[in-house]
Image: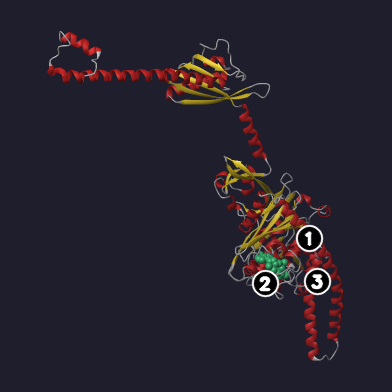
Amino acid sequence: MDKMHSLLRRQLKRYVDDGRVIPDRWHGFIGAVNDAYRQMDRDREMLERSLELSSQELLQANAEMRAVFHAFPDLLFQTDLTGRILDYQAAGSADFRFDKEKAIGRQICEIFPAGIGKTFGEAIAQIRKTGTMASLEYDLPGPDGGKACEARLLLMREGKIIIIVRDITERKRAVELYKTLADSSQAGVFIVQDGRFIFANPHIMKYSGHSERELLGNYSLAIVHPEDRALLRESAIDMLKGRRTNPYEYRIIDRTRQTRRLIETVRSITYGGRRAILGNTMDITQRYEMERVIRQAQKMDSIGTLAGGIAHDFNNILHAVMGYTDMALAVPHLDDRLRSYLGHINKAGERARDLVKQILTFSRQKEQERRPILIAPIVKEGVKLLKSSLPATIRINLSIGDGSTMVLADPTQIHQVVVNLCTNAAHAMREKGGVLDIRLDDESVSASEAQHPLDLAEGDYVKLTVRDTGTGIDPAIIDRIFDPFFTTKGPDGGTGLGLSIVYGIVRDYGGGVDVASEPGRGTTVTAYIPLIENGELPAALKSDPIPGGKERILFVDDEAELVELGSVMLDSLGYQTAVRTSSIEALEAFMAGPYRYDLVITDMTMPNMRGDQLAAEILKVRPDMPIILCTGFSEMISEAKARNIGLRRLIMKPLGKRDLARAVRDVLDEPSRMDCTPKKQGMPPPDMLRS
Ligand SMILES: Nc1ncnc2c1ncn2[C@@H]1O[C@H](COP(=O)(O)OP(=O)(O)OP(=O)(O)O)[C@@H](O)[C@H]1O
Ligand SMILES: [Mg+2]
């Protein structure tokens, strides 16, 4: 046995008188107890050593902690659970503006300005309740723009609270500055990493129409026009590698599916520790559009002058050709074959004359008669004319608002605009059919907005929109469609003058034409024409008063809206107006009392019975009945022919109030009428009474 453990020896002494005389049979047991005592000693020694070590480490750690605390540019408080300050530590240089005088022992709410103290109080109450952490921010006013602070409150064991206050003025200013720059920038600023947007400033949302959520995290190429993606990638790589310095141009598709044009520069940056691309963009859509408009205007002006000159000379030559042909045709005993040849020359000459007329309109060398006119009836008239020639597969939608919009224009020209645009639209739908939408809307262009893409001046415009669902226009030719003689319709199809004439006319009125098209889906052409208010009529037109009267008038037109317009105009002039939208009904109304009316005004083109036929029926009953026939552009009836069948007057649609009023008064006052009207209005002369 090892040397006996002192404790064991002492106990053995107590129980066995002489420790040295131990019975043999106890030896094994005592050896085991002795070993256990020794093991216990070793364990205790180890424990003591480790305790000593850890308390040394603790002291060391504490000292380090203190050093770190001292090095913090922060303000630290230790409070109890009520917010009473137990200790504090303020970094040397920073000024947190609190009352250092007797800070220890006071409530933290008391040493800060009132408002701030209160937020501290609330935060302490909160962490007491939740047992977690709280943070708050506050501003300290001051002459240098003040200071921003952030405080964090931590609940420690033993019912203590640690409060760390940090000066975040610099950080906040930097964030603010960055935000102001990014938000107010009139250029797009973005960061792309791994091909996806990770930042985009508000300007990008503005021109793309996409929200931040739709952009961030998504591929930046997704909004780029598919045709421009490869080019954009190539240009960007060139710039990132320093092979190019000039901004490059590309197109995007915005949220409304419109194409917008951008210029861009990019450079390589590190963001979040990884490579990224910082880009700057500028939306140049408007500038590009305006340049296009100006280029077009210049091109049109020079071509117009040239074409006008040629057409003028050509007209003189044509005059001679047709004049001599007429003379040749008048030669007696003309050979039949010769007569037929001359007839052909004449026909071709007429076609040439029409063409020259078109060219002259386009080059604006024809006399125009501009006057204030209601535009809606002309549009209706143009559409009506077209309707009959369109296949049933084309549906027409016409929306002309309240129809009161006036423009200062030549009605023939407005008619030309409508017919040309609608003919193009119909042609684009001739194979598959579709919908032809024609609209008139008022639109204001205000000075405060950025310059109008069509270079329109400030003011009110009437917007004529002609939209089709036809073939659309190939983007490759869209820049050329306004060019004179540009056509895709082949030699027998079109002259290619339609759109250039539309352009010339509208531009002349101080308006503009826009076209948007998607191949396979359709085309929208929009013409803006400055509108005039009634008060704006030229002085010459305002000076003499519009003549009125009290006579009874029967007004006939198959278009309900035109009837409405006519009766409103006549009523306002003092007349008593009865209206009919069918010529048959009109005739019945007349027959029911031939002397009930002093005047009949009728449209020419109507189903069942034309206007001239209605007039003939009326005149059979009352040969003296004054009748005015209204004709559109399409209905060729001469003044002479009209008088021949007994009509008093022909007036051209659309009906302007002034023209209508004058025609009505003239006809009613014509002496021929006085001769054969009964003395008393409404009473037939005895010999006229039948049935
Ligand atoms: N609504 C449209 N849809 C599709 N293409 C159109 C449309 N409008 C015009 N275009 C295209 O523009 C070209 C020029 O039109 P423009 O009206 O000037 O001449 P045109 O129609 O060819 O000839 P014209 O008007 O003398 O009959 C057309 O040939 C056609 O290719
Ligand atoms: Mg055309």
Residue 310 at x, y percent in the picture: 84, 70
- Return the mark for residue 662: 1
**Disc 1 C-beta below 8 A from ligand 1:** no
Q: Is residue 141 left or right of residue 656?
A: left
What kind of element bears circle 1? helix
Q: CA distance from mark 3 to mark 2?
A: 33 Å
Task: Say which quadrant the C terminus sits in.
Answer: bottom right
Q: Which residue is at the front of the view, 314 or 85?
A: 85
Residue 513 % position (x, y): 72, 58
- Kindly identify which numbered label has been placed on residue 610: 2
SS at mark 3 in the image:
helix
Give the image location of residue 459, x and y in percent: 74, 49
In the rendered structure, which disc, 3 or 1, sits on the residue that comes first in sequence?
A: 3
Among numbered discs 3 and 2, the one appearing first in the sequence: 3
Q: Nearer the viewer, mark 3 or mark 1?
A: 3
Q: Residue at x 62, y 33 (%)?
A: 175
**Amino acid tagged 2:** Arg
Confirm whether residue 573 shows in the render. Answer: no
The secondary element bearing badge 2 is classed as loop
Does the beta carbon of the residue at mark 3 sit less than 8 Å from ligand 1? no
Q: Residue at x 57, y 24 (%)?
A: 166
Residue highlighted by disc 3: 356
Place residue 392 in its image quadrant.
bottom right
Query: Does 21 appear above or below 484?
Result: above
Spatial separation of the CA atoms under disc 3 and disc 1? 34 Å
**Reading the chain from its start, which is encountered first: label 1 or label 2?**
2
Q: Is residue 174 visible?
A: yes
How many numbered marks appear?
Answer: 3
Report the amino acid beneath label 3: Val
Within 10 Å of disc 2 (Cα), the crowding (few <14, some 14-19, many 20+) is some
Q: Position of residue 428 (x, y in %)?
A: 64, 68
Q: Quadrant of the N terminus?
A: top left
